[in-house]
């Protein structure tokens, strides 16, 4: 939108980036077709156009390339206008047109098709997966970068002189501008200028960009830019700013008055300015939302509808009735609906308009054992303690002793009967925390001997000799960073530095599958609450959705600009949330792989995510020690919980969603009044209308308790079905 | 600060010499300077890049320390062969040697005799990872034997409480939910021990000094008291709590001596009971009132003593006690508390004095001056201010000198002090004499009927001026009267608390008319009976009822500016010209001279 407003010059400038790929295409054509294109510049050089007054044949080339680009994209009117303005003769294009039509009529129909695909494919590839050179070359065409400090300080003076209400908004421009100018200087080998520029203005930048600036500061040579993915991403993606229309006009006017094309170019090329109507935002509002690697999420990125409601619980009679279930699970419930006996408040789900349809994604059928488990769950749920500010949960802390700082991940089963720990020495250990010991299934030979008709066959298949409290699973060849139990407690997933995700059987305590797809460390994995599916994400910045019975991923979610650090399934299994070190959280639709939400606001890599049990809210914790609360429905941040002094590694809502527990490296568990935070949200609908968060600083009111351990970082939290809070961490002597 | 750091980040590169050294180590003899520079930049960049990646592994490993394996993993990420087997006992494994103009870094690799290694017994196998659940869970787990409980794991409750604030230690249920802690094992005392405990405690707080000395001696030296320590600490903290309320100075002193004895006992380790002892000690330092008659009893000694205890415990247990400062910072703290605060802080050593007390000297000085120099002064305040002043002088002087003059400072200080005390003494004597003349203290006694209740049990009720004359002078209600200057009398009376009433009694020069009284309630006060008394019963009524002192200051219209004369007085006044002091007093004499009783 902004680009169009920029006028013709800008449009041409903007197209310049695209020039390269298209000229690549031309190059291909040239090689294949010979004459026609190489002839065209000379034929049109005679025409005196304002643009080609410089007379450089490259300009002509560029113009032609642009024309061809426009033509390719079927922008015929623009082609005409451009041609007229540039004074290019009709035939220069017709030549090409004739060329292709001639070819069409010619004998090599098939060849042409091949040609077309050839000519198009580099461009397409260039757009999707930008060639490094192409992207970098965007920097090569600017004027004298030595003047950048002048431009920058000029803009700084201007922004400092504008009205207060605009200043905060316009100040957002500083950081991306600073980065791009610096990179441009580096790219053009102005090393000392770049260094001076960096030193002079680095202090102006917001403190939450410090990490990026540190990376930037080490980069001083063109060659360095080549291998640095973070910076590459910074350049390929546009930095998104939200600016009110008034402020934007102010900036634009200023830049045009000053003829400050350098800055304007950078803004056009590397910034996406999301203009909104209305009052400019205040500094605190901006600060709340900014901080991510690529600016804020675009507003339209969060407009898609998200079915955040819960799926209907399959109805299970306490005395099991087999035929009934079949019908219920397969094709919707309308046939027989009985009022539920449990107290989980599931009545409301029936008419929940936000719930996805039951069959939106195929879910596994419930097995008998699952139903038994559900019944257990309901029984336990009736004994659940209602939590609240006056009724805080008891916390039971499981310390791992003698772990030598090697504990990297912990998970509890839903019924809190098993604990699994992932360790830096590549092992996974499983403990039973009930008197029931862990037993393996007997060997095949022994299984043959048992009486398959007996009632206690499930008992008989277990080998008593192997009973022990804990089992060690060997298989990974690097530290285990993520671990997740399947909801039916039969499987365990672990993700590791070695790039694999492994599925372990908790019946035989052996590895069943190694899912290879990530080439780099896999930081986290999480089973779907309905089983069968799981999600994994790692250093390769792609989250993958798998099904346990497929060795290849079903979906790849790409879009993050840095490592995916944590992954979590939505309670209805239709969505997954991923947190990343680019300081954004994305919500992906499992059905079509689209990114439906981008949450920005964290100032550090995100290491913990938690969905509220009703599926409406998401909590996220990052290394900046803050917990942010998000409303999935409208994509807004509605709470900021400050208090932790170190990275937050675990977040969990209580079973009824009243309490949010957060555990951190600062050796504390903190409890927050989630209900109150949600209530504050519902009373305030202004923010939803304008799209601007207005956070009140009420962390202290929401904080219900802080519980300190002496030297045990809290790396996992879990609410039992009766709302006892379990915490786990390794004791650091 | 942050900027500076960033700038450094920007510029730090490896020295080119290292490049040369490394090149030599792989056999490249002559490396050109430019290549070295280029190499060092490249290498520095790569190292930084790898370090940043390694940081990622650290975060995901949920650690705070970067390990060599993180670096290895980061290298793997870049498809670089990791460094195998980097093991080092030392922090930096290199040794440095120089000679013949060359510098050399090398690994120190000792020759190891294989047979030695074979023959040495194997080290103990490190303990396997184990899961420790809180006790309740273990009941369920049943089979889990009680693990070796790491010290500290179960002390989790006491330690954070201390850091939170010694005075309000263990505030509102900090540990409410976390870990049903294993209850501290209850130590059953044997009959003998119980007897001993009873004897000791009775002797400590009893009336016989000889017995007490013996008991304290026993506490300070007996090696087997550990079992009783919890009881002693509870005894002390409870004792302080009760006796502070009852203002039982003697008992408080005894209890503090017990603390001292406990601290002196080398076999006792008090740290776990500090949460009980420290609040008790601090109470004795800063409490508003420690004895029934604060003007007479020497509670200052107790404060000093407790402050020393505090300092001692701080030194021994290295806890910070910044919290003492907070009551002092309050503007309205009483002199007693103020004294305690300063005493407690000063005992902590010159650094604390420097950072916490010195910055406040001027404020304190002004406040002391207000009390000392103000013409109307209650006894208690005066004593308090006096004590605070001498305390400040005692502690701060040497520190100031040390800051200014370094080593010689304290000595200089003592000399200067000596030299100046002479002059100051003279000056003070002058002060004193003039003061006795000018101070219009016992001028007026009016019996007071209804005031008794508000004053409390204290029969000789004390008059206090909270903010002295400053309150009055700008008052619009005291314009200068026409030629026969009507004398104004400000009557100030205070009850024990902060409440005070100031009355302006305007008398015509003829003194025949009945006095017109108007009350100016300052602060929260309402002393209605006083007003009534003044207007109703008239002057000159003296009876057998308890005496209420009134200090009456006449305030001629010109006197409103007299305040200005009181410039800086306090510690500096020692050095100031004694003549000037006299001058000052002369001026303030003028209102005093015209003071007279209205009847």
Image (cartoon, helix red, strand yellow):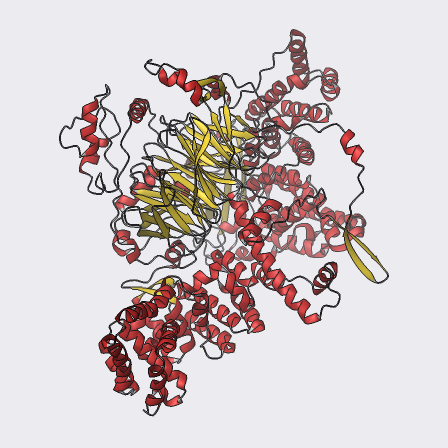
Give the farthest residue toward the front.
Answer: A107
Counting from the top left corner in percent of width and height, residue A546 is at 36, 42
Give the farthest residue toward the right.
Answer: B100
> Would residue A665 be visible to someone looking at this image?
no
Residue at the image position 45 percent from the left and 77 percent from the top: A142
Counting from the top left corner in percent of width and height, residue B49 is at 56, 57
As rendered, which of A179 and B16 lies closer to the eye? B16
Give the farthest residue toward the left.
Answer: A335
On screen, A165 above or below A85?
above
Please identify the quarter of the rendering in which residue A89 is found.
bottom left
In this rendering, position of residue A464 left or right of residue A637: right
As rendered, which of A128 and B252 lies closer to the eye? A128
Please identify the quarter of the rendering in which residue B580 is found.
bottom right
> Would residue A605 be visible to someone looking at this image?
yes
Q: How many marks?
A: 0
Give the farthest residue toward the top.
Answer: B191
On screen, B524 above or below A314?
below
Counting from the top left corner in percent of width and height, residue A242 is at 34, 62
On screen, A697 above or below B455?
below
Name the quadrant of the N terminus of chain B: bottom right
On screen, B543 above or below A682?
above
As rendered, which of B45 and B149 lies closer to the eye? B45
In this rendering, position of residue B310 left or right of residue A723: right
Residue at the image position 68 percent from the left and 15 percent from the top: B200
Counting from the top left corner in percent of width and height, residue B371 is at 59, 45
In this rendering, position of residue A296 left or right of residue B29: left
């Amino acid at each position: 939108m902004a680009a169009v407003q920029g006028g013709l010059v800008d449009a041409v400038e903007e197209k310049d980036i695209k020039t390269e790929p298209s000229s690549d295409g031309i190059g291909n054509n040239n090689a294949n077709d010979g004459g026609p294109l190489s002839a065209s510049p000379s034929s049109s050089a005679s025409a005196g156009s304002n643009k080609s007054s410089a007379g450089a044949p490259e300009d002509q080339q560029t113009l032609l390339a642009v024309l061809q680009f426009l033509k390719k994209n079927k922008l015929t009117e623009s082609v005409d206008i451009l041609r007229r303005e540039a004074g290019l003769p009709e035939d220069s294009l017709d030549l090409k047109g004739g060329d292709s039509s001639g070819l069409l009529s010619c004998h090599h129909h098939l060849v042409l098709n091949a040609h077309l695909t050839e000519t198009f494919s580099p461009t397409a590839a260039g757009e999707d997966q930008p060639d490094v050179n192409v992207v970098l070359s965007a920097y090569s065409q600017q004027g004298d970068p030595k003047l950048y400090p002048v431009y920058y300080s000029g803009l700084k003076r201007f922004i400092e002189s504008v009205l207060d209400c605009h200043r905060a908004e316009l100040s957002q421009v500083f950081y991306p501008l600073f980065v791009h100018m610096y990179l441009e200087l580096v790219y053009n080998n102005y090393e000392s200028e770049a260094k001076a520029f960096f030193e002079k203005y680095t202090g102006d930048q917001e403190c939450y960009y410090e990490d990026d600036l540190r990376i930037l500061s080490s980069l001083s040579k063109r060659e360095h830019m080549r291998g640095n993915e973070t910076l590459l991403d910074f350049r390929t993606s546009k930095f998104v700013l939200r600016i009110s229309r008034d402020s934007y006009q102010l900036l634009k006017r200023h830049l045009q008055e000053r003829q400050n094309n350098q800055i304007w170019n950078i803004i056009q090329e590397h910034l996406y300015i999301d203009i909104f109507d209305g009052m400019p935002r205040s500094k605190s509002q901006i600060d709340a939302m900014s901080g991510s690697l690529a600016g804020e999420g675009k507003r339209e990125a969060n407009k898609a509808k998200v079915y955040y409601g819960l799926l209907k619980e399959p109805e299970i009679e306490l005395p099991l009735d087999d035929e009934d279930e079949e019908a219920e699970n397969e094709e919707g419930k309308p046939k027989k609906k009985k009022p539920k006996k449990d107290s989980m408040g599931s009545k409301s789900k029936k008419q929940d308009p936000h719930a996805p349809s039951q069959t939106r994604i195929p879910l596994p059928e419930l097995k008998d054992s699952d139903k038994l488990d559900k019944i257990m769950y309901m029984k336990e749920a009736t004994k659940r303690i209602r939590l609240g500010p006056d009724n805080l949960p008891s916390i039971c802390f499981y310390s791992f002793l003698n772990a030598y700082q090697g504990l990297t991940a912990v998970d509890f089963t839903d019924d809190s009967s098993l604990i699994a720990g992932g360790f830096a020495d590549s092992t996974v250990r499983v403990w039973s925390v009930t008197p029931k010991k862990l037993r393996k299934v007997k060997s095949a030979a022994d299984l043959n001997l048992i009486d398959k008709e007996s009632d206690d066959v499930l008992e008989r298949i277990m080998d008593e000799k192997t009973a022990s409290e804990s089992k060690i699973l060997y298989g990974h060849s690097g530290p285990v960073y993520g671990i997740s139990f399947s909801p039916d407690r039969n499987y365990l997933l672990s993700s590791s530095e070695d790039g694999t995700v492994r599925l372990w059987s908790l019946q035989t305590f052996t590895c069943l599958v190694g899912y290879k797809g990530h080439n780099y460390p896999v930081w986290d994995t999480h089973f779907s609450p309905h089983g069968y599916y799981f999600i994994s994400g790692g250093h390769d910045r792609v989250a993958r959705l798998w099904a346990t019975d497929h060795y290849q991923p079903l979906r790849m979610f790409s879009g993050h600009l840095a490592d995916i650090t944590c992954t979590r399934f939505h309670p209805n299994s239709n969505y997954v949330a991923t947190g990343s070190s680019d300081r954004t959280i994305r919500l992906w639709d499992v059905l079509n792989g689209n990114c439906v939400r981008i949450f920005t606001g964290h100032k550090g890599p995100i290491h913990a995510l938690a969905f509220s049990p009703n599926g409406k809210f998401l909590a996220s914790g990052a290394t900046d020690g803050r917990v942010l609360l998000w409303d999935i429905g409208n994509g807004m941040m509605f709470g900021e919980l400050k208090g932790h002094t170190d990275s937050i590694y675990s977040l969990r809502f209580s079973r009824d969603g009243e309490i949010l527990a957060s555990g951190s490296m600062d050796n504390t568990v903190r409890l927050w009044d989630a209900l109150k935070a949600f209530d504050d949200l519902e009373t305030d609908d202004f923010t939803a209308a304008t799209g601007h968060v207005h956070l009140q600083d009420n962390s202290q009111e929401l904080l219900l308790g802080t519980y300190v351990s002496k030297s045990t970082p809290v790396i996992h939290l879990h609410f039992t079905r009766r709302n006892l809070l379990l915490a786990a961490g390794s004791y650091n002597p | 600060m942050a900027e500076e750091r960033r700038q450094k980040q920007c510029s730090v590169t490896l020295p080119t010499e290292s490049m040369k050294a490394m090149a030599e180590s792989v056999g490249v003899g002559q490396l050109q300077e430019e290549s070295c520079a280029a190499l060092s930049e490249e290498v520095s960049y790569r190292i930084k890049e790898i370090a940043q990646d390694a940081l990622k592994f650290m975060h995901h490993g949920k650690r705070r320390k970067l390990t060599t394996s993180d670096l290895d993993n980061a290298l793997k990420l870049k498809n670089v062969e990791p460094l195998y087997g980097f093991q080092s006992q030392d922090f930096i494994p290199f040794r440095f040697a120089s000679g013949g103009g060359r510098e050399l870094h090398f690994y120190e690799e000792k020759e190891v005799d294989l047979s030695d290694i074979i023959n040495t017994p194997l080290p103990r196998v490190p303990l396997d990872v184990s899961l420790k659940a809180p006790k309740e869970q273990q009941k369920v787990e049943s089979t889990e034997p009680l693990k070796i409980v790491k010290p500290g794991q179960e002390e989790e409750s006491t330690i954070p409480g201390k850091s939170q604030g010694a005075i309000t230690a263990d505030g509102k249920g900090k540990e409410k939910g976390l870990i049903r802690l294993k209850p501290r094992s209850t130590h059953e005392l044997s009959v003998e021990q119980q007897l001993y405990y009873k004897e000791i405690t009775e002797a400590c707080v009893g009336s016989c000094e000889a017995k007490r000395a013996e008991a304290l001696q026993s506490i300070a030296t007996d090696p087997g008291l550990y079992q009783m320590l919890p009881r002693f600490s509870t005894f002390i903290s409870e004792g302080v709590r009760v006796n502070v309320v009852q203002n039982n100075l003697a008992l408080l002193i005894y209890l503090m001596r017990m603390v001292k004895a406990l601290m002196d006992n080398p076999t006792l380790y008090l740290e776990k009971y500090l949460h009980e002892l420290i609040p008790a000690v601090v109470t004795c330092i800063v409490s508003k009132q420690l004895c029934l008659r604060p003007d007479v009893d020497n509670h200052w000694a107790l404060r000093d003593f407790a402050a020393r205890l505090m300092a001692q415990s701080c030194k021994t247990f290295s806890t910070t006690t910044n919290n003492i400062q907070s009551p002092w910072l309050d503007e309205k703290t009483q002199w007693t508390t103020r004294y305690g605060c300063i005493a407690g802080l000063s005992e902590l050593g010159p650094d604390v004095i420097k950072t916490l007390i010195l910055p406040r000297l001027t404020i304190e000085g002004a406040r002391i001056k207000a009390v000392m120099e103000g013409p109307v002064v209650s006894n208690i305040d005066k004593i308090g201010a006096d004590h605070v002043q001498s305390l400040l002088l005692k502690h701060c002087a040497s520190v100031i000198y040390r800051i200014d003059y370094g080593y010689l400072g304290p000595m200089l200080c003592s000399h200067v002090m000596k030299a100046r005390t002479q002059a100051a003494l003279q000056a003070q004597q002058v002060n004193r004499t003039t003061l006795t003349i000018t101070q219009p203290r016992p001028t007026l006694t009016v019996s007071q009927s209804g005031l008794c209740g508000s004053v409390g049990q204290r029969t000789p009720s004390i008059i206090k001026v909270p903010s002295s004359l400053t309150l009055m002078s700008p008052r619009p209600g005291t314009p200068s009267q026409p030629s026969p200057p009507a004398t104004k009398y400000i009557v100030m009376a205070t009850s024990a608390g902060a409440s005070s009433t100031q009355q302006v009694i305007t008398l015509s020069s003829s003194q025949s008319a009945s006095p017109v009284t108007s009350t100016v309630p300052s602060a929260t006060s309402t002393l209605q009976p006083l007003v009534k008394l003044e207007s109703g019963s008239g002057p000159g009524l003296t009876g057998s009822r308890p005496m209420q002192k009134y200090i009456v200051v006449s305030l001629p219209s010109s006197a409103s500016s007299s305040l200005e004369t009181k410039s800086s007085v306090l510690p500096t006044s020692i050095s100031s010209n004694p003549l000037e002091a006299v001058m000052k007093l002369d001026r303030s004499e003028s209102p005093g001279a015209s003071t007279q009783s209205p009847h």
